[in-house]
Image (cartoon, grey):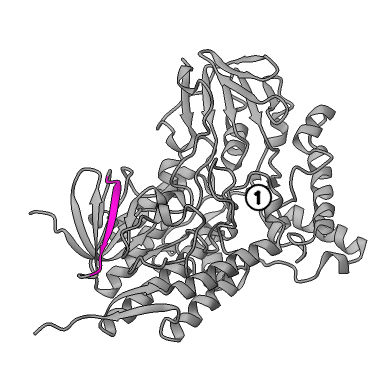
Amino acid sequence: MSERDTYDVVIIGAGFSGVHQLLKIRKLGLTAKVFEAGEDLGGTWLWNRYPGARVDSPMPLYQFSDPEIWRDWTFTEKYPGGKEIQAYFQYVDKKFDIKRDVSFNSRVVSAHWDDSRDQWTVTVDDGRVFQGQFLSLCTGVGSKYYIPRFKGLDAFKGEMHHSSRWPEDYDFKKKRVGVIGTGATGVQIIQEIAPDVAHLTVFQRTPNLTLPMRQQKLIADEEEKVKKDLYEISFKRRHQTFTGLHFDINPKLMRDATPEERALAFEEQWEKGGFHFWMGSFADLLFDQKSNDEAYAFWRKKVRERVPNPELQEKLAPTQPPHPFGVKRPSLEQRYYEVYSQANVTLVDISKDAIEEITSNGLKTSDGVEHELDVLVLATGFDMVTGGITSIDIRGQDGITIKEKWADGVRSYLGVASATYPNMFWIYGPQSPSSFTNGPSSIELTSDWIIDCMKFMKENNISSIVPTAEAQHAYSELVDQLGAVGLWSRAKTSWYMGSNVEGKKTQMLQFSGGIPAYAKLCNDSAVKGYDGFHLKTASVHA
């Protein structure tokens, strides 16, 4: 039986967003095909199989909210590791036969809109061509990895791996390992492999202002009671808080609290762990420098208590903050700072002694030292938020690629669609709340809105929908204005702002107003008949 080539919806990506879209589209009675560049389900959890990979949102919130799914699945940890998330996707597949509608090892290279037919033509890297009325981009925020242009990168004779292209099985024992980068990925890898390697050299440009994870095992019997009593409540609560977690920002300003009140609040949030100290703190933490400085001083004190060496204290928790606290998404750690007290670990400050070149035997810094390595780990991040979309040749009504359109900055309407690209939506992408939130909270909110839009169009004989230029301009200006209110731009290199990638436009890439405000904007548009969009009625043929 030959594969059909026309669907109602073409979905790119088989992670949380793609699977959620597929399940919802099936319930609408529409046809869909998912194209996934990898060999299995999982999205970012398929690609990022490095040691220590772990979620940073607590259970039960980092999963699908459908009771039909969570009723029969119980995670074993509050913050599950990557392998357990991969097993979760296999469970979901077994329950709903997801894979029957997925084409694996299929990288979409182009998607072109035909205005005369109100249809997308999608081409896969093996030459196959498909059509769909709708194009759903479920590429996530971190699907295009990034490697800076290090001199001599091809000269290294040892093994070299980017964190998002990790080999299935790998043994670090008795090897000299270098890790470039101390973002979330770097932190997880470093604390995981440090006990096993012969020697670990960490190349740090900017200290990571990490927070304690407070990991804990989940007991199955106790979780069953929590499911019965609290799961439904927790999932409803997600869309009522700024981050889509079960707690919210303290509405009180730090400057209005007494010193004693601030001290007790900081201690309470710190002990709770996770993102409580970041997104459960006083309302002005991310907007007022003086308040932020006080939070940083508390953070610095807590970290230095765990680092006995004064020189390392200054590198890991410097007297002067490298940037305001929290303007980069904090990483959650379990034993990160204790690692640097190990005799087999060296921390190199490359803001002082820059990477000069990669050599055949390792890495040479500007102080003339050559660090000899057997393995080089590139925890250098991603072309975040936009890279997964701009890496595809997407052309809309005017034939211009979205990469060209966004060269001078992202522009969208409601963080789900872009003018001149009809019937194209994205989830957990540019100008949505995305990484300011718990992933599944933001994903399900946006995905449901898109599904409702498709349903409305089918019921009302509408063949295409596209943002107006005016609505797009107004929304994008709002995203910029919200970003300017905070301290975000004071980080020299931040993927929130696109400044981690050489040559990329610096701008706030995400909606920083929180989930409730974002949901209201989206819902207000829908209630008004999708205000801000141009709707085209389908032609009726005799």
Horizontal and vertical percent position of residue 278: 71, 56
Q: Is residue 171 left or right of residue 454?
A: right
Q: Residue furthest right?
A: 259
In the drawing, does residue 210 fall left or right of residue 145? right
State the residue in front, 8 or 305: 8
Q: Is residue 278 visible?
A: yes
Q: Is residue 7 above or below residue 404?
A: below
Quarter of the picture containing the C terminus is bottom left
Residue stretch in magenta? 106-115
Locate residue 359: give its quadrant: top right
Q: Does 239 appear above or below 506?
A: below
Residue in the picture at 84% in, 43% down = 301
Number of residue marks? 1
Nearer to the camera, 218 or 276: 276
Does the magenta run of residues contain 112? yes
Tell me which amino acid carries mark 1. Lys
- Residue 153 percent location from the top left of the image: 49, 23
Q: Quadrant of the N terminus?
A: bottom left
Direction from residue 252 to residue 152 in the image, left or right: left
Q: Residue at x 16, y 58 (%)?
A: 5
Crowding at dot 1, Cα within 10 Å, few <14 / some 14-19 / many 20+, comes out as many
Q: Decide if residue 243 is in sight here.
A: no
Q: Which residue is mark 1?
A: 328
The location of residue 343, given as percent across then percent down, is 71, 20
Q: Is residue 153 above or below residue 211?
A: above
Tell me the element at label 1.
loop
**Where residue 207 sits in the image (x, y, percent)?**
70, 38
Q: Residue at x 64, y 66 (%)?
A: 482
